[in-house]
Amino acid sequence: MNVQHPFLRQIQLKKQQIPDYNRYPFDLAVIRSLTTLSFHPKVTYIVGENGMGKSTLMESIAVAWGFNPEGGTMNFSFSTRATHSSLFDYIQLIKGPRRPKDGFFFRAESYYNLATTIDELDSQPSFGPPIKDSYGGKSLHEQSHGESFFATFVHRFGGEGLYILDEPEAALSPLRQMAMLTRIHELVLQNSQFIIATHSPILMAYPDSIIYNLTPDGIEVQMLEETDHFLIMKEFLNHKDKMLKELFAEASEP
């Protein structure tokens, strides 16, 4: 049996070095309660409500590893606006014995900037092939939002890689989200490791994984069926008319 070892085993927060827990991002509940966080060798999910610090935590892990804060491979160094926090300076990475041959930080909110940078670089003289060839051969701006997302997952992700994905479902239909699960499995079989922040119960469904739910009280481990994302979606689909009636009644209240 082939035992897969993680590229990234764990992060530790350098608590003694944190200057002030009363300012961002150290005032976030997830950071206040964080000591160590261990990663599944295949897929780790970071979930929770908006404002819990998912993207901040994902960004700090990615930047500490060496990725560009706005996304891409470790070869990208563009910056449209330096808004990332200093949290990465206080994160200690505990790496595994293997080193990845590939890697990518996918950030939905700044994907447009990544696509623009690729087009700009490809417009300059170069002895090598266009960068867009690694993304399927077509400019990411000449595709729909969802198509350009999926082009990266299918063409750019090459296996034996560490892939940090922040809300990759943002432009994907439910059908494409299921296709994304298939792609994740293909890459896991090629000894890849994923860390994924998501709101999608579909994407959370990979069976060989761990789910960390960020709450106002800290971090807890959950099964898919225990997450609010799954329970709320299930309740809505099973009792749509009842839930719509309740939602619209709330909206009608003075």
Image (cartoon, rainbow, N blue to C red):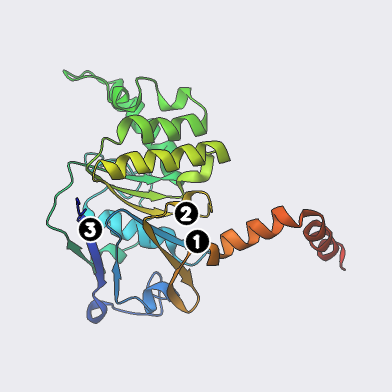
The x, y position of residue 85, in whole percent, is 35, 61
Count of all numbered marks drawn on residues in the image: 3
Tell me the distance, in whole angstroms, between the alpha carbons under discs 1 and 3.
Answer: 23 Å
Q: First in sequence: mark 1 or mark 2?
A: 2
Q: Can residue 163 be seen in this view?
A: yes
The x, y position of residue 129, in whole percent, is 22, 19
Which residue in the protein does label 1 denote?
224
Q: First in sequence: mark 1 or mark 3?
A: 3
The x, y position of residue 135, in whole percent, is 34, 27
Q: Mark 1 near mark 2, Cβ–Cβ under 8 Å?
A: yes
Q: For residue 8, which numbered disc appears in the image?
A: 3
Q: Is residue 173 visible?
A: no
Instruction: Tell me which corner region of the image, top left, top right, bottom left or bottom right, holds residue 197.
Output: bottom left
Tell me the distance, in whole angstroms, between the alpha carbons under discs 3 and 2.
Answer: 20 Å
The x, y position of residue 212, in whole percent, is 42, 66
Q: Is mark 3 on a helix, strand or loop?
A: strand
Which residue in the protein does label 2 denote?
204
Query: Residue drawn at (27%, 55%), measured in percent from left and top?
Result: 63
Crowding near pointer 3: few (<14 within 10 Å), some, many (20+)?
A: many
Amino acid type, label 3: Leu
Tell me the distance, in whole angstroms, between the alpha carbons under discs 1 and 2.
Answer: 7 Å
Q: Which of 172 and 112 is in front in this view?
A: 172
Q: Mark 3 near mark 2, Cβ–Cβ under 8 Å?
A: no
Query: Residue drawn at (22%, 51%), measured in percent from left and top?
Result: 66
